[in-house]
Image (cartoon, grey):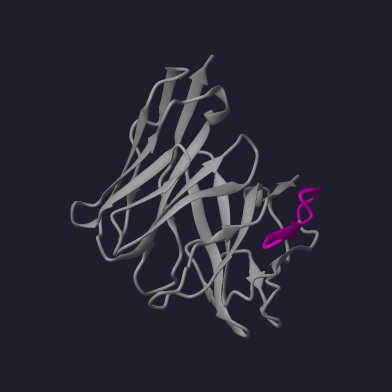
Amino acid sequence: KQEVTQIPAALSVPEGENLVLNCSFTDSAIYNLQWFRQDPGKGLTSLLLIQSSQREQTSGRLNASLDKSSGRSTLYIAASQPGDSATYLCAVRPRGGSEKLVFGKGMKLTVNP
Amino acid sequence: EAQVTQNPRYLITVTGKKLTVTCSQNMNHEYMSWYRQDPGLGLRQIYYSMNVEVTDKGDVPEGYKVSRKEKRNFPLILESPSPNQTSLYFCASSFIHSGGVNNEQFFGPGTRLTVL
């Protein structure tokens, strides 16, 4: 059974720091991995999608990497800002079956001005 | 604008009163899915559909029904809601995985349901 883990569950940093958010998964048989952002009580905003054949994706200050063989992904946030404060969720799409996304529990990020 | 819409966004109801949460997407996606999100449990899949008239149970289907009569719509039906179905519900859609196809899942804004 695929399991996704995000550690730590929460992180508080001063503005301007470069951040690395970690995600690990137990089964490398995946189609892709997505990183999402969720603001309190709000929906999920897709940040980056990495297909299983790719190593990384970039969007603005965000860079996500994927090491499928070791079951790891990282989301790098450059020059963090208070507006980056949110919960960040990692999800993998396992091959076959229901094609559901299997989510981690998320990491709550607070960027202090 | 490509999007997934859900209605209503907020709903307070009482135990046993049937309700439907609608979901619609305008991206011609084959795949649609419902998730619920609960504190400490994360997001869990309720039901999914691979195409019109093709639906199947996810991880937590008890107490829910779905239908897929049209490609764009995937309503979630609670025939007799109970307090343990109080949750934040998300509808999602994507293309089914196929080589070279971008199968990113898009999520609706969520429906916050409270069952008293």
Can you tell which quarter of the image residue A55 is in? bottom left
Q: Which residues are magenta?
A: B1-15
Can you tell which quarter of the image residue B38 is in? top right
A33 shown above or below A43: below
Q: Is residue B59 magenta?
A: no
Q: Is residue B11 magenta?
A: yes
List x then y, in percent, for residue A58. Answer: 41, 47
Q: Residue at x 57, y 64 (%)?
A: B62
Looking at the image, which residue sits at the far bottom? B53
Q: Residue at x 71, y 73 (%)?
A: B73
For the C terminus of chain A, give its image quadrant. Answer: top right
B92 displayed left or right of A21: right
For the N terminus of chain A, give its image quadrant. Answer: bottom left
B33 shown above or below B90: below
Looking at the image, which residue sits at the far left? A69
Q: Residue at x 37, y 61 (%)?
A: A32
A10 shown above or below B107: above
Q: Residue at x 79, y 54 (%)?
A: B8
A38 shown above or below A85: below
Q: Please tell me which residue lies in front, B10 or A51.
A: A51
